[in-house]
Amino acid sequence: MMIKNSLDIIEICTKENVPIWEVAISYEEAQSGFSREEIVEKMGRHFSQMQKSIDTGLDLDDRKIRSKMFRDDAKKLMVYRKKNKPLSGTTISKAVAYALSVMELNCSMGRIVASPTAGSCGVLPAVIISAMETLKMKKKHGVNALFTAGMVGTIIAKNASLSGAIGGCQAEIGSASAMAAAAVVEMAGGSPQMAFDAAAIALKSVMGLICDPVAGLVEVPCAKRNGMGASNALIAADMVLAGIPSVIPFDEVVWAMNKVSQIMPSAHKETSEGGIAITPTGQRLRDEIFGED
Ligand code: SF4
């Protein structure tokens, strides 16, 4: 099965009248040699771990959160959204709390699913599980959504990169956000074309985003960017479900992201030599954590 871009996938979906997640399972069968049952069972385990990561992160004793730069932000947001009317709405505020939760667990050396990377591990679980709860979907829908997300990630990896060290944060949080947007559009009944439109809107909305982790740790700005990546995905999904298409097709957005990566300076590619990493506060935090030498 030859798949290079979203056009190939949409063509298969149209010809065979199947959603993206069906194409993803067939693609994985052809690539891995595993049976459909084995592949679905393994994705089910990834889904269960994502759910567990959210729950474990929300339950973390704040003394166990190992970050020296933040404490139980996920819990704070959960408490806030229960006591108030969150301005960003119930699904988005919950998704952001879930994303922070998974990232707090990641910072505490807990078990997460790197999807597509450890630094962006909060976005997919947050978006898919909060959308499932709003739409009252079952686990099998969440697992299917992960296959859709995986197919979108595969196209980005083939034509650009998923790595902050190569493409900046647009490649990590941007890709995770695009994957999540497509996944929930399909989950909500949108077509494959609509799913890729949502992915395009999510990705181009963070194009150029640099990778600038304070003290070289995947904590600041990473955790909050996972929250923003989750909200970006849900907003892109809602726009498309409302009938708003992406003016620039997904494959062209990926091409453009790759071009931006190529001219992005190395100071903005995970080296902590630019962006917020070199602000006075960023440098003070680095010195406090690792010492001035
Ligand atoms: S800033 Fe860099 S390390 Fe942090 S999430 Fe973005 S790409 Fe990953």
Image (spheres, rainbow, N blue to C red):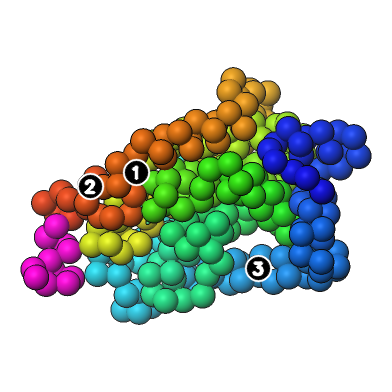
Q: Is residue 215 magenta?
A: no
Q: Which residue is at a point 72% across and 54% down the rendered structure image? A: 147
In what element is the residue under mark 2? Answer: loop
Looking at the rendered structure, the kind of residue marked 1 is Ile
Quadrant of the rendered structure where residue 260 is? top left
Q: Which residue is at a point 15% across and 49% down the rendered structure image? A: 279
Image coords of residue 280 (percent x, y): 11, 51
Dominant SS type (magenta) = helix
For residue 123, side relative to residue 62 (left or right): right
Quarter of the picture holding the C terminus: bottom left
Looking at the rendered structure, the kind of residue marked 3 is His
Q: Which mark is on residue 274?
A: 2
Tell me which numbered mark, 2 or 1, is placed earlier along the sequence.
1
In what element is the residue under mark 1? Answer: loop
**Magenta highlight range:** 283-293
Disc 1 C-beta below 8 A from ligand 1: yes
Residue 132 seen in render: no
- Assess disc 2: are there few (<14), some (14-19) or many (≥20) residues with their C-alpha within 10 Å of its C-alpha: some
Whole-Å distance between the Cαs marked 3 and 1?
A: 28 Å
Whole-Å distance between the Cαs marked 2 and 3?
A: 34 Å
Q: Which mark is on residue 210?
A: 1
Q: Which residue is mark 3?
A: 46
Outermost residue, top side: 247
